[in-house]
Image (cartoon, rainbow, N blue to C red):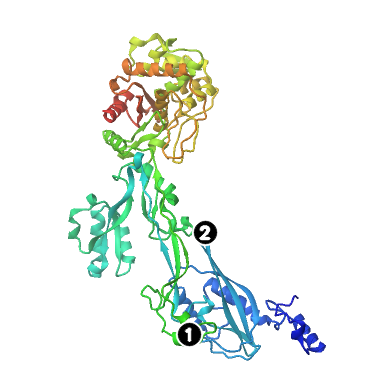
């Protein structure tokens, strides 16, 4: 064992005899665990007690630790950590050493002679927000009869603690960031909201149930559940029933005894329905949020609950700062009973001076910085989103409207009707797009050698593998027989497209769809269904795919991308989150392909089923798609359109026709 004490020079040795040197060497070789070679061995019993102490401090209980004064130690530990929010450092024994100092500290009732005291050095570590609070302390372990006990002192927990001070942990929240639109326009920002509830201190307890029931009925929540919530809360509690915007607070709430309203700040969209299925909501953190946060969230923090506010919660919330401070035990913020001030007695503790016992309090022992959240920037235009939701108000059921900027692919509006509730059908719905998909089919036919002027046969019916296909019931017979492909698109003749099914394959149809933004998956940072086209070799299924049914599915957002691709002359994949714009994976559109697609969609507005948008849109395509049980079939009603500035898709889940049901909604939006 290498000597660790001071090295004596030959001059200093003086008359030291060889025998004394030999004796010193013998003692040195008898060194033990955690001690230098000049120290006697540490008894196993003292080492065991040191380990028990470290474990007890880590667990927050000294029940299994031999102590000279267990009652005082337990009370001290409870008080010291009462304000630490359950946080405790992990404690490990760094070393043990027989102490030459036999004196006892202020907290000790045990005296010891030389050799009967062991000093344990303890390492404490507590990771917080990427940093670690680390410090050391010492504990005296004193022999008492045949056993060893810890001489309790607050400095064992932290070297700066006294019997008049404790530890306190506080969290410093950064400011939650906003969700913004183009030009940093406000979408989700802090607004004053109002918690409506029963203040139990304002009424006699005999009226709690009646008031809770009356308030629950007034704000339309479950009365039984709210009464139970009020009953279980403390007698001084204000029990929140619901959080409302100013305009939603019932005027007669003051007639209910004990009913009250308190204000706080909460991130909100402009209205309750504004892009609700997309943006989601925020609220006060509950137990599940705390678990999700893994130490970064506490109950009562404002967190995202759904939608983008939940998905980007870490970014919007920012980073919590932590401060651990030394405070008086008599501090009003203490959550345990304050202990008597014994600073005079504490002044005799080893290693402390009177000045160290009366620091300027609170004194920061450890801290991590807070940081504000970072805004989530969207392409969504608040004005157009509001206009889209207003236009959808005329729909009686579920309906969606999506607007995309062709030049950038940015989504300007992503709206659902109120019947959709919190569902984001506009960007996640999976619907058969019907004849609006004929734009992609037309591209596949152009790539197969057809032109907009090519003749196709629009017969009343067509038979593919025994399956009979027909046109919609009020199809204009003036456009039957051999007609140009342009008119087949404009009038939406199903049989004309199905008659060409042999010219394409499932693979070529998928590739064409991908070139106008449909059927290829992209991770754009928000819930998005870009469509799918099932692979098939069955001729009748492929024939059905060509008119947007069979194995074809798309969201309104994906079909808005189809219109935007034609308008832009390049593949447009709609996107929403700044910094998350997808790169198209499909084969690009050629100049002649773009010209052909524009020609057929322009004809649809001028001469065909898209005439409802004449003067508002440059090109369009209508569509219906059957769904449901045989004999009880219903139809989705679709319409897509574009100008040089905007591309729009509208889908009404249950409607009669694209032009008659979806068309008026787009007309209201564009007008």
278 w.r.t. 118: above or below: above
Residue 73 visible to an observer of this rendering: yes
Q: Find residue 119 and report its image quarter.
A: bottom right
Say which residue appears at 46% left-offset and 81% top-offset: 355
Task: Find residue 228 and report its horizontal and vertical position in percent.
Answer: 32, 62
Could you tell whether 449 is left or right of 479 in the image? right
Helix, strand or loop for disc 2: loop
Mark 1 surroundings: few (<14), some (14-19) or many (≥20) residues within 10 A = many
How many tags in the picture? 2
Residue closest to the eye, 541 or 405: 405
Task: Find residue 308 and report its horizontal and vertical position in percent.
Answer: 41, 45
Say which residue appears at 47% left-offset and 80% top-offset: 356
Helix, strand or loop for disc 1: helix
Task: Find residue 504 and report its horizontal and vertical position in percent.
Answer: 52, 18
The quadrant of the rendering that contains the N terminus is: bottom right
Mark 2 surroundings: few (<14), some (14-19) or many (≥20) residues within 10 A = few
Residue 464 visible to an observer of this rendering: no
The residue that label 2 is drawn on is 130
The residue that label 1 is drawn on is 346
Residue closest to the eye, 217 or 535: 535
Say which residue appears at 44% left-offset and 41% top-offset: 526
Specify the farthest residue to the front: 11
- Give the CA distance from mark 1 to mark 2: 35 Å
Task: Find residue 506 and report its horizontal and vertical position in percent.
Answer: 53, 23
Say which residue appears at 62% left-offset and 73% top-offset: 93
Labelled disc at residue 661? none
Q: Find residue 387 and report its image quarter.
A: top left
Could you tell whether 521 is left or right of 263 in the image? right
Specify the farthest residue to the right: 18
């Amino acid at each position: 064992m290498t000597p660790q004490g001071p090295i004596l020079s030959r001059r200093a040795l003086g008359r030291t005899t060889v025998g004394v040197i030999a004796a010193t060497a013998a003692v040195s070789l008898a060194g033990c665990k955690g001690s230098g070679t000049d120290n006697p061995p540490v008894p196993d019993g003292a080492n065991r007690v040191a380990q028990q102490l470290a474990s007890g401090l880590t667990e927050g209980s000294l029940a299994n630790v031999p102590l000279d004064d267990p009652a005082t130690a337990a009370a001290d530990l409870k008080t010291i950590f009462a304000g630490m929010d359950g946080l405790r450092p992990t404690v490990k024994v760094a070393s043990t050493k027989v102490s030459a100092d036999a004196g006892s500290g202020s907290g000790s009732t045990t005296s010891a002679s030389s050799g009967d005291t062991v000093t344990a050095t303890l390492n404490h570590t507590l990771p917080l927000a990427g940093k670690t609070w680390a410090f050391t302390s010492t504990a005296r372990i004193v022999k008492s009869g045949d056993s060893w006990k810890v001489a309790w002192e607050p400095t064992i927990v932290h070297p700066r603690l006294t019997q008049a001070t404790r530890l306190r942990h506080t969290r410093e929240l950064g400011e939650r960031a906003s969700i913004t639109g183009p030009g940093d326009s406000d979408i989700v920002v802090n607004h004053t909201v109002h918690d409506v509830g029963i203040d139990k201190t304002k009424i006699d307890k005999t009226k709690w149930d009646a008031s809770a029931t009356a308030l629950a009925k007034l704000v339309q929540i479950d009365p039984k559940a709210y009464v139970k919530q009020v009953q279980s809360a403390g007698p001084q509690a204000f029990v929140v029933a619901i959080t409302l915007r100013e305009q939603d607070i019932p005027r007669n709430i003051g007639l209910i005894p004990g009913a009250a309203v308190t204000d706080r700040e909460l991130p909100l969209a402009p209205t309750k329905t504004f892009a609700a299925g997309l943006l989601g909501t925020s609220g006060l953190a509950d137990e599940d949020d705390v678990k999700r946060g893994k130490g970064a969230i506490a109950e009562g923090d404002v967190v995202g609950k759904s939608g983008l506010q939940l998905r980007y919660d870490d970014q919007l919330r920012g980073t919590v700062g932590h401060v651990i401070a030394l405070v008086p035990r008599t501090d009003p913020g203490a959550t345990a009973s304050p202990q008597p001030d014994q600073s005079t007695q504490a002044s005799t503790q080893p290693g402390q001076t009177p000045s160290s016992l009366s620091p300027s309090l609170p004194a920061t022992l450890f801290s991590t910085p807070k940081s504000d959240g970072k805004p989530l920037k969207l392409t969504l235009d608040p004005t157009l989103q509001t206009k889209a939701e207003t236009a959808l108000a005329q729909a009686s059921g579920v309906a969606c409207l999506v607007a995309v900027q062709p030049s950038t692919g940015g989504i300007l509006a992503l709206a659902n009707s109120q019947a959709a509730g919190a569902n984001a059908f506009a960007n996640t719905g999976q619907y058969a797009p019907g004849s609006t998909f004929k734009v992609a089919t037309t591209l596949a036919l152009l790539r197969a050698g057809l032109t907009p002027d090519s003749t196709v046969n629009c017969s009343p019916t067509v038979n593919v593998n025994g399956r009979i296909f027909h046109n919609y019931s009020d199809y204009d017979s003036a456009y039957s027989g051999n007609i140009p492909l342009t008119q087949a698109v404009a009038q939406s003749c199903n049989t004309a497209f199905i008659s060409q099914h042999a010219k394409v394959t499932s693979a070529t149809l998928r590739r064409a769809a991908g070139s106008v933004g449909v059927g290829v998956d992209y991770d754009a940072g928000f819930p998005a269904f870009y469509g799918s086209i099932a692979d098939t070799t069955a001729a009748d299924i492929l024939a059905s795919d060509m008119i947007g049914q069979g194995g074809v599915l798309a969201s309104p957002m994906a079909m808005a991308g189809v219109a935007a691709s034609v308008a832009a002359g390049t593949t447009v994949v709609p996107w929403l989150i700044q910094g998350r714009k997808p790169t198209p994976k499909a084969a690009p559109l050629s100049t002649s392909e773009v010209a052909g697609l524009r020609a057929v969609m322009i004809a649809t507005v001028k001469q065909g089923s898209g005439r409802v948008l004449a003067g508002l849109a440059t090109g369009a395509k209508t569509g219906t798609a059957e769904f449901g049980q045989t004999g009880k079939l219903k139809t989705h009603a679709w319409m897509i359109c574009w100008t040089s500035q905007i591309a729009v898709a509208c889908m009404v889940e249950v409607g009669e026709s694209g032009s008659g049901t979806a068309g008026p909604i787009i007309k209201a939006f564009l007008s």
